[in-house]
Image: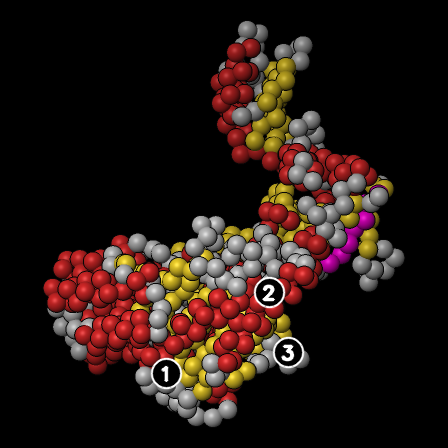
Amino acid sequence: MTLTIAVPSKGRLQENTHDYFARAGLEIVQGRGVRDYRGSIVGLDGVEVAFLSASEIVGQLAAGAVHIGVTGEDLVREHVADVDAKLVLLTPLGFGRANVVVAAPQSWIDVRNMADLEDVCAHYRARRGERMRVATKYVNLTRRFFDEHGVSDYRIVESLGATEGAPAAGSAELIVDITTTGATLTANALKIIEDGTILRSEANLVASRRADWSDGARGAARAILSRLAASELARRSREVRAVLPAGKAQAVALAAAKFGASPEVSGDGMAVFLCPRARAAELADFLLSQGALRVVAQNVEQVFETDNPLYNALASKVFAAG
Amino acid sequence: MVATSSAGREARRAAGERAYRYIADAGFSRVEPAILQPTAPFLDMSGEDIRGRLFLTAGPEGEELCLRPDYTIPVCLLHLARGGAAREARYAYLGPVFRARAGAEGELIQTGLESFGRRDIEAADAEILGLALEAAEAAGAGPLKVRIGDARVFDGVISALGLPEYWRRRVRRGVARGQPLEKILDRGGLTPFSKAGVLLALERADHDGARALVQDLLSIAGISTVGGRSPSEIADRFLEQAASRGDAGLGTEQMQALERFLAITGHPDAAALELRALAKDAGLEIGRALGSFEERTGFLAARGLAVDEFSYSAGFVRDLDYYTGFVFEAVSTDPKAAKPILGGGRYDGLARKLGANQETPAVGAAIWLDRLTAEGSV
């Protein structure tokens, strides 16, 4: 049996996804033509790649038609009822970042937070006998968020594009939409409500609990997740090596504890650390202070470990429950 | 989705037929609104909260449609489509309604009755509750506990305390959801404009002055006004914030009166005495609402209903604006029963909200046949 992975078929999300897999040595190839919606991963048998839109991927995952997919958390939270029963978000991928926010006209200088908004919605309805209209494509996220903040005097106007233009066009009073920099909102004379960030979303690696996880599918998933985890760990780490003077064994243990670096010491006194990237320079300084004459820090490509957090998440949340 | 045996459904249908026939024999004529309804009236009346419980679909031109989640709004729309809103009419219905519920069947059978246009509202209230209880019995319901409330008394108390309309709705919504009063009245989250010097200045300003100031502020900041609220509305809210600083503006005595009111429960006659005492002590002018309440209790007793066993709760209100008076529900006395077998009330505000040009007296009740079979907890 094959494992099916769904990846976005267009735009920046597609490029980033291909890069993400390529960094792990997993080259995604499309079938015969660019219009072919099925593909494979070079050198891996039993894996099929499906090219779909990000929102189709959510639907296919929820239905169990694909095993693993790359898609935005915003779409997952919006389109899937009871997410935990159907899907497992294995890991955020660091791209496709966008916030789902509540935005109101800048001219509402009396409105800063959701409590103000609730108050204004209540006034608006009392005065006009109509509910304030919220344009959005995130109907479910909006409904849940507004309910949490006690806002009930509003109506949703579904918007399928250019939501930020709705207030100026007069088809809604405020909006819920995604934004990355906020520039589009500002250009439309809108501002983000202070505590109105509904979700900080990014692309995620998502597994379906409902897919048919045959032994073959599990094996293929292990192979892929092992490489993705290896490249992810490598990306976050640097290898730091130094020769410490004799009798400085304690310095190695100290460095490990201080900088979260896992050490290995070879017979000739060479200590090799795998260190979180951000702390590599500090570690080097520390090793110099302990008597090392030279410290070499370098990037690594892949770090495979017995303990694979991605596969563990899949095994514990999908297989164990299945 | 939970499958239901067709035998169970047929049993409920048969029970529904018996209840329906009882209602029809009392002079209510059959009405059968479309199953597929425009979504807007339900969302306009109930708010977006109901969206998650609707089965939604779209028409060929993209119009939002849903399977009817209840009969009241569709029946009222039919009533309005057939003639003048205020004319007298009595409708009975029997059929499926649709509610999306995780892990439960979405199609439920309801029977019920709606009465429009009667000016003798207390007698009409009593007739509807009486008929609903008798119809439920005809369908095979066991002993029922009846709970009653009164939105007119509730709204009357809130208004008499001097709270503006949006506060009345806020309190009603909070109470209907079972929130504690402190939480409902807490407006701590509001941006504290009262600390802004400009508001202190505005406290003594009039509306025109405030509007001019808001317009100046916007133009100085280079902000264009976009849709929705006008500078005048923004100015009004500023002024109101300045006056009341955003809280309900309730003094200690009023707060105590509200707490005392919400704590009133029990026998309808005893409750009426307590309500009168409260009105006197707190100086609340709710005499007409209380008169109506007492008159209704008299009609209920005259109809032979076991009023002594009814339980009134001051805080029993629905989170729906169009309910304007009597509300009631009946739950099986079986301790396992959770949800009411029947419920209803007076909704004089609905016809107008649906487009009629005048308030239209209306009262109705629905029986949930799916909760009737077995021990009342199906």
Element at label 2: helix
Q: Is residue A64 left or right of residue A251?
A: right
Does the magenta segment cover residue B333? no
Mark 3 Cα-neighbour bin, 10 Å: few <14, some 14–19, many ≥20 = few
Q: In terms of secondary structure, what is the magenta stretch mainly?
A: strand
Where residue A102 appears, as percent x and y from the top left, is 45, 62
Numbered label attached to residue B361: 1
Numbered label attached to residue B12: 2
Where residue B273 appears, as percent x and y from the top left, is 19, 65
Q: Quadrant of residue A74?
A: bottom right
Mark 2 Cα-neighbour bin, 10 Å: few <14, some 14–19, many ≥20 = many
Q: Are marks 3 and 1 in contact (CB under 8 Å)?
A: no
Name the residue: 51% across, 75% down.
B22
Element at label 3: loop
Residue A279 seen anywhere in this rendered image of the structure: yes
Colouring style = secondary structure
Given this view, does label 3 or label 1 mark the residue nearer the observer?
1
| Lower sequence index among marks 3 and 1 | 3
**Up-down: is B13 above or below B335?**
below
Return the chain for callout 3: B
Where residue A292 appears, as percent x and y from the top left, is 55, 16
Q: Amino acid at mark 2?
A: Arg
Give, as a single range, the part of the protein colored magenta: A46-52
Residue B109 or residue B332, whichever sits in front: B332
Residue A71 or residue B369, whichever sits in front: B369
Residue B14 or residue B291, whichever sits in front: B14
Name the residue: 61% across, 68% down.
B13
Residue denoted by label 3: B59
Residue A193 seen anywhere in this rendered image of the structure: no
